[in-house]
Amino acid sequence: MRFRILRIELRRSVALSAAVLIAAIGVFVLFTSNPPYYSWMQLVVTQRDILQLTWPLALAAGAWQGIRERRSRIEELVGTTPRPRWQRVLPIATAMAIAALVTYLATLAGATGHLRRIDGYFPAGALPLIALGVLALVAAAWLGLAIGALLPSPLTAPMLFVAGFLALALLPPIVFNDERGRPGASLLFPALQGPHDGDVAIQTLSTRANLTQALWLAAVAVAGLVLLAAARRRTRIAAVVPVVLGALIAVPAMPDRIADAWVEDRRATQVVCTQDEPRICTEKALSHVLDDMREPARRALAILAAKLPPAPTRVLVERADKQHAADRRSPDTLVVVIGIDDLTLPTADALLGSLLDGAGVPWCENMLGSDEPGPGGKAANPASRYLAARSAVTAWLLDRDPQPVPGLEGRDWERDMALARETLKALRALPADEQRARVSAFRDAERTCADVDRLELLSGAG
């Protein structure tokens, strides 16, 4: 096949015009169906998910191209050429494959404008998902070409679009099992949804799932190409062979459930640190926040070194959904928790407050379990007393009025803040060394999550 013939097919066929149209529709859907994407993996998976729409469009585009000879009324003329059919159809099949590639990559490129941090972590696991998306569109285009050539009617393309869209919309829920969830055989469909347990930014599709889906999509693409190139009925029947072989090999090798196909991306959860001071560490999935954390981290460490030595030497940025790690309460580590799906980072002052919250130690869940009034005639219940103590310590470090503890929205803070202001006023009335000693006792209790009343530690009664 000469490049000149391919160039003519690209220029005169519907390949590039269909690519532009489908890519525009895909970008529109990716922009309007979700808020800004917080990670590359979320964008890549969402693009695979909207194959429910773009795959039938590629199928219809291929079918419309497949009826070109009938539309132009040159079927008999082309049929009398001495060249074998496979040589005649190879240029247009290649042109449609190139169009599918351009469609998918152009859609992804256009949707990056809806990505919150384009400089964020790009996982290696996203590459096979993109490649399989391209393969799915190629299979749709070739299958549409073959069906259009066999059924050269102007109604073929719209009917294929409707049939493909309904199949991808209705069949997956049919195979869904309430007890076991989505079966692994759902990978037979080109559309792919993200994991339902855990964040997609730190997960990736397993190699087993990628390979089995690649085998199946390749079988469908080969079947479409064979059906398109076949000149006789017997050869057309042979097009079923790749589909049958692909199903026989791929389906048994697929995971039992889609949930099993999603595994942790170990590179995304790998801890990386800045080389300069202050030393700030986080997972690669959150590495884009390191530059924004430098100034708040420097200020927080300086405040702790001046007011509450010995101060930590590094800052750890953690995901909000991560299980509490052992080093979260290490004396040399200052921890700040950030939601990986936050659309915008907090301001520098808000980050500083989060770093110094509770003397720089994460709050203890065992101290938040009770909202019942405490014994002994205490002024408030244990949870309120605990949160008031943390607010008072944070305000003492920052020389400001107490504010609600970040991350615990939805509480009635009026009572807690009144208690915190009362405690802070009493604490500031003491000599500087006594203030530091009481706040140090509070910090020691926080590091071990000791079951003691924090307000009593600050007031000197504990």
Image: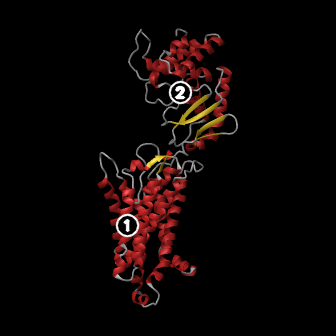
Residue at the far right: name it.
276
Q: Vertical placement of 147 versus 253: above or below?
A: below
Q: Are marks 2 and 1 in contact (CB under 8 Å)?
A: no
Looking at the rendered structure, the kind of residue marked 2 is Pro
Give the numbered dot on residue 245: 1
- Measured as percent of width and height from the top left, residue 451 is found at 47, 17
* Residue highlighted by disc 2: 362
Q: Vertical placement of 120 versus 396: above or below?
A: below
Q: Residue at x 45, y 20 (%)?
A: 384
Q: Vertical placement of 236 versus 403: above or below?
A: below
Q: Earlier in the sequence, mark 2 or mark 1?
A: 1
Quadrant location of the N terminus in the rendered image: bottom right
Looking at the rendered structure, the kind of residue marked 1 is Leu
Q: Residue at x 36, y 63 (%)?
A: 247
Name the front one of labels 2 and 1.
Answer: 1
Question: Is residue 313 visible in this depiction of the protein?
Answer: yes
Characterize the local packing of mark 1: few (<14), some (14-19) or many (20 or more) Cα atoms within 10 angstroms.
Answer: few
186 or 410, nearer to the observer = 186
User: Residue 224 occupies which quadrant of the picture?
Assistant: bottom left
- Measured as percent of width and height from the top left, residue 18 is found at 47, 70
Mark-to-mark CA distance, 2 and 1: 56 Å
Q: Residue at x 50, y 62 (%)?
A: 104
| 367 relative to 315 in the view: left or right | left
Q: Vertical placement of 338 versus 77: above or below?
A: above
Q: Secondary structure at mark 2?
A: loop
Q: Secondary structure at mark 1?
A: helix
Give the numbered dot on residue 237: none
Question: Is residue 13 visible in this depiction of the protein?
Answer: no
